């Protein structure tokens, strides 16, 4: 594992919000490209953002999946416990129901017995001739029956309370089971969705390749509407906002690998004219770039004029093909959307021109 890979791994937890952070640091908005930029430039920026944050995105998805799988295990455990609790409360409810039925029946029987005893007493009191002994026995029977009614009523009330408690516990156990079942269902669906998203996630290289196919069209559409306000600074280098996030990541990753890179990015058309003169071009407006002492594009054609090219330097010096910075760029720059113009080791742009 390279130093750069270790650095990326250490920053994985925070990198998922890297775009917003980068926007603050280098003048970008929260999205990879400005809303006012040509649509194709926004597409390029988005593809490069997805490419450069691919590993972080994938790791975040895997972390989510692991959490979902752990949640499924927890909910299944809870479901098993809830199921046992529900079976226990169901047994208690059956017992309580049986006891309540018996108690209510005994209470009803006691009330019937009391009514009968009262009727017997009434007859005894009305009987002619009246028998004191019979009346006395009837009164005692009424008293005993009334006492039994009071007892059976208390027992019935107790049984009803226990039945209500058992019913409440049974309903709570059922709700617990239903909640656990819903938890298992939800997390299982979420895990299935995450697995599908992981399987469908394009590779970082495929995102970068898609961006590369748009490069020339980005140049063609950015140039006509370009304004200086479309640029921003990345570590002191002025570049188009479209490439700012990718350029910053390239500098950061090179630094993590022990390679310092900087450079000259945007320059005005007037500066391009001055450079053509300084570099001895036979004619500022018509002579080919190769005719200058230092190859310099005709004004209006340089990607520097729209901030989509950078002349790379390292340690304060323009790089050559023999420098460590060039060798690093040759291996890695494509990952960030930058391509070398073969005639100029230092010149890197999104289209290679």
Image (cartoon, helix red, strand yellow):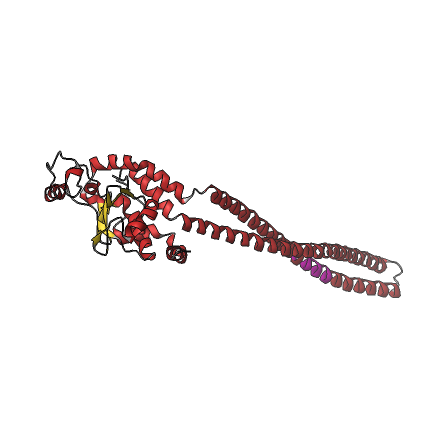
Looking at the rendered image, the quarter that the N terminus falls into is bottom left
Describe residue 324's horizontal placement relative to residue 118 as left or right.
left
Q: Position of residue 108 (x, y in %)?
A: 76, 55
Q: Identify the residue at horizontal 84%, vertical 62% (top origin).
A: 138
* Near-viewer residue (147 or 55): 55
Q: Quadrant of residue 117?
A: bottom right
Q: Identify the residue at horizontal 40%, vertical 41% (top origin).
A: 206
Describe residue 108's horizontal placement relative to residue 232 as left or right.
right
* Near-viewer residue (215 or 229): 215
Q: Quadrant of residue 95?
A: bottom right
In the picture as drawn, the residue positioned furthest to the front comes out as: 322
Q: Is residue 201 visible?
A: yes
* Near-viewer residue (106 or 331): 331
* Near-viewer residue (273 or 99): 273
Looking at the rendered image, the quarter that the C terminus falls into is top left
Q: Position of residue 13 (x, y in %)?
A: 41, 56
Q: Which residues are magenta?
A: 153-164
Q: Position of residue 292 (x, y in %)?
A: 14, 40
- Name the main secondary structure of what is drawn in magenta: helix
Q: Is residue 168 visible?
A: no
- In reply to whether residue 28 is colored magenta, the answer given is no
Residue 288 versus residue 124 in the image, above or below: above
Q: Identify the residue at horizontal 80%, vertical 62% (top origin).
A: 145
């Amino acid at each position: 594992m390279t130093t750069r890979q270790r650095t990326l791994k250490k920053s994985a937890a925070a990198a998922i919000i890297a775009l917003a952070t980068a926007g603050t640091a280098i003048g970008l908005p929260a999205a990879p490209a400005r809303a006012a930029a040509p649509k194709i430039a926004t597409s390029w920026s988005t593809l490069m953002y997805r490419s450069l944050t691919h590993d972080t995105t994938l790791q975040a998805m895997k972390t989510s999946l692991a959490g979902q799988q752990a949640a499924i295990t927890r909910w299944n455990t809870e479901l098993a416990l809830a199921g046992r609790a529900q079976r226990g409360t169901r047994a208690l409810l059956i017992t309580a129901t049986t006891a309540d039925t018996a108690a209510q029946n005994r209470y009803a029987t006691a009330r019937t017995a009391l009514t009968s005893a009262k009727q017997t007493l009434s007859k005894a009191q009305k009987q002619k001739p009246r028998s004191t002994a019979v009346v006395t026995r009837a009164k005692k029977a009424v008293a005993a029956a009334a006492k039994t009614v009071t007892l059976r009523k208390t027992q019935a009330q107790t049984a009803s309370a226990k039945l209500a408690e058992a019913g409440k516990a049974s309903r709570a156990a059922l709700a617990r089971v239903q909640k656990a079942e819903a938890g298992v269902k939800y997390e299982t669906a979420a895990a299935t969705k995450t697995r599908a998203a992981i399987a469908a996630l394009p590779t970082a290289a495929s995102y970068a390749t898609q961006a590369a196919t748009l490069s020339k069209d980005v140049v063609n559409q950015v140039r006509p509407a370009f304004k200086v306000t479309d640029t921003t600074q990345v570590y002191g280098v002025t570049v188009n906002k479209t490439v700012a996030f990718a350029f910053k990541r390239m500098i950061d990753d090179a630094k993590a690998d022990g390679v310092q890179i900087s450079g000259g990015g945007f320059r005005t058309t007037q500066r391009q004219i001055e450079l053509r003169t300084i570099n001895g071009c036979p004619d500022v407006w018509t002579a080919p770039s190769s005719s200058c002492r230092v190859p310099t594009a005709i004004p209006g054609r340089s990607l520097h004029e729209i901030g989509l090219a950078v002349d790379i330097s390292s340690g304060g010096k323009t790089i050559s093909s023999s420098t460590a910075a060039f060798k690093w760029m040759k291996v890695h720059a494509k990952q960030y959307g930058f391509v070398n113009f073969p005639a100029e080791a230092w010149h890197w742009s999104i289209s290679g021109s």
